[in-house]
Image (cartoon, rainbow, N blue to C red):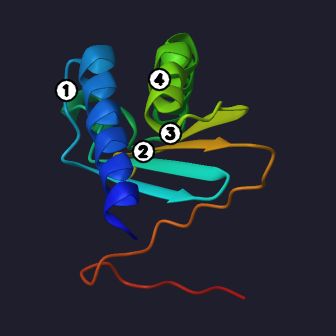
């Protein structure tokens, strides 16, 4: 990644962090940005409030948390799209948000018609489970 790409990624991370604080009143623990040709993926790590984490312990609660964050994303999506356009010079054609309630991770994917598959990998402390 050259210095120009690095600056763009840093600006997007800053904007995503600021939007999360504006929307929820809480900053994520960290923000990861992956920008590759026509796809931008923003991951907000540990972005859920303590109350949301408690609620997400049950399947019904997890569904509520996911739906809340999807609706929140939809309602503020336009301003984030404008910031991405300002930073990258490119329009966002598609956007989706996904919440992983167990870890508190929120993923925003912005694409131009691509299929985006996001895999959250376990940490070294998490056991790896395999089923067949």
Q: Which residue is mark 2?
A: 101
Q: Which residue is mark 3?
A: 88
The mark nearer the N terminus, 1 or 2, is 1
The mark nearer the N terminus, 2 or 4, is 4
- Side of 75 where 113 appears, left or right: right
Q: Position of residue 115 (x, y in %)?
A: 77, 55
SS class of the residue under badge 4? helix
SS class of the residue under badge 2? loop
The mark nearer the N terminus, 4 or 3, is 4
- Give how far apart the Cα atoms at labels 4 and 3 are: 12 Å
Residue sitting at 69 percent across and 56 percent down? Answer: 116
Label 3: few (<14), some (14–19) or many (≥20) C-alpha neighbours in 10 Å? some
Q: Which residue is mark 1?
A: 26
- Give how far apart the Cα atoms at labels 2 and 4 are: 22 Å
Mark in the foreground, 1 or 2: 1
* The N terminus sits in image quarter: bottom left
Closer to the camera, 132 or 71? Answer: 71
- Give how far apart the Cα atoms at labels 1 and 2 are: 16 Å
* The C terminus sits in image quarter: bottom right
Label 4: few (<14), some (14–19) or many (≥20) C-alpha neighbours in 10 Å? some
Q: Position of residue 18 (x, y in %)?
A: 25, 26
Q: Position of residue 117 (x, y in %)?
A: 67, 61
Tags 1 and 2 in contact by the CB under 8 Å rule?
A: no
Closer to the camera, 110 or 55? Answer: 110
- Side of 58 where 24 appears, left or right: left
Q: Could you say which quadrant of the image residue 48 lies in? A: top left
- Give how far apart the Cα atoms at labels 1 and 3 are: 26 Å
Q: Which residue is mark 4?
A: 80
Mark in the foreground, 2 or 3: 3
Q: Residue furthest right?
A: 113
């Amino acid at each position: 990644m050259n210095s120009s790409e690095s600056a763009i990624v840093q600006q997007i991370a800053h904007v995503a962090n600021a939007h999360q604080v504006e929307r929820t009143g809480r900053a994520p623990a960290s923000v990861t940005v992956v920008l590759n040709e026509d796809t931008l993926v923003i991951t907000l790590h540990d972005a859920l409030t303590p109350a949301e984490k408690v609620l997400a312990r049950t399947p019904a609660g997890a569904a509520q948390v996911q739906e809340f964050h999807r609706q929140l994303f939809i309602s503020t999506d336009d301003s984030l799209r404008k910031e991405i356009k300002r930073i990258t010079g490119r329009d966002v054609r598609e956007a989706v948000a996904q919440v992983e309630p167990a870890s508190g991770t929120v993923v925003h994917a912005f694409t131009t018609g691509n299929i985006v598959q996001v895999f959250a990998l376990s940490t070294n402390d998490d056991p790896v489970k395999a089923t067949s």
